[in-house]
Amino acid sequence: MSRFKGIPPRPIYSAIPPVALTPSRRRFLLVVVLLIAMVPWPILYFVSGIPSAPGKASADELRGMSAGNLHGIGEAIYRYADDHGGEFPDSFKTLILTQDIPTVWFVSPCRSETPAGRLIDRNTQAIADQLVLGTHLSYVYMGNGLKQETATPNTVIAYELLSTPNVGTNVLFGDHDVKYVDAATAEKIVGQANAGVFPVTMPSN
């Protein structure tokens, strides 16, 4: 027979003193939660350790993250169009000034460009002015002058700058689909853009 007979058991948790949530602690917790929520998913992707090799993502994983950037940009473009009579923005600068979109989406993990501004900065003219190809911008926008009703599944809205010769690239099309195209197709798309063709479309062969 237990020698503690007649003594009610004391809950284990009762030995732990309660922590009072003072107003200052509540504010601190709220700030922490908001900061975590503001971290863009590409950063969380790296921090989470998803890449197969420690500290280094494979080429396929990097291309997938870049495609995710273009997909997010495409969603922002269509949100803009919904608010402007179906017209696409005239530039990425206009897009970042009017839509809640992190600057990290404008740089490809396959390339060496860095995000404009600080991680928490969004939608300011100073950041928009920093969106320069080869510095803080990895994607070429081809949607100026397009509308939702004129953009087809073959219309190129944006494409990633070519990283190296004989390597394909990610392309955002008018139906909001992102595809990885081979090097020959990518060079034809870039050739159309450089020649001033409008709209730029997916090559037939």
Image: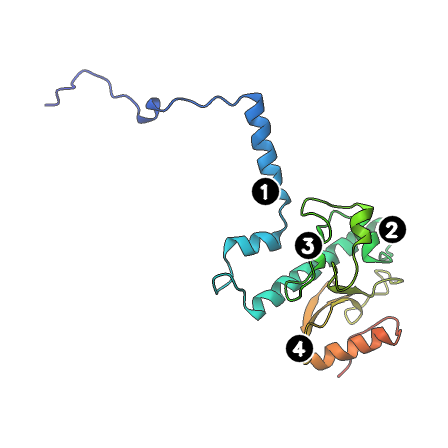
* Measured Cα–Cα span from mark 3 to mark 2: 25 Å
Residue 81 visible within the image? no
Asked whether the beta carbons under mark 2 and mark 1 sit within 8 Å of each other, the answer is: no
Residue 178, above or below 97: below
Q: Which residue is mark 2?
A: 84
Indicate whether 35 appears above or below 46: above
In the depicted view, which residue is nearer to us: 177 or 38?
38
Q: Nearer the viewer, residue 5 or 187?
A: 187
Residue type pointed to by label 3: Val
Is 173 in front, or is 190? 190
Which quarter of the rendered picture does the C terminus lie within? bottom right
What is the secondary structure assignment of the residue under circle 1? helix
- Residue 178 picture location, percent across and down: 69, 66
Q: Which mark is residue 167?
A: 4
Q: Amino acid at mark 2?
A: His
Amino acid type of the residue tagged 1 in the rendering: Ile
Residue lying at 62% horizontally and 38% vertically, measured from the top left = 34
Q: Which is nearer the N-term, disc 2 or disc 1?
A: 1
> Residue 148, how many percent across, how many down?
83, 60
Q: CA distance from mark 2 to mark 1?
A: 32 Å
Please report contact status of discs 4 and 2: CB closer than 8 Å, yes or no. no
Disc sitting over residue 104 in the figure: 3
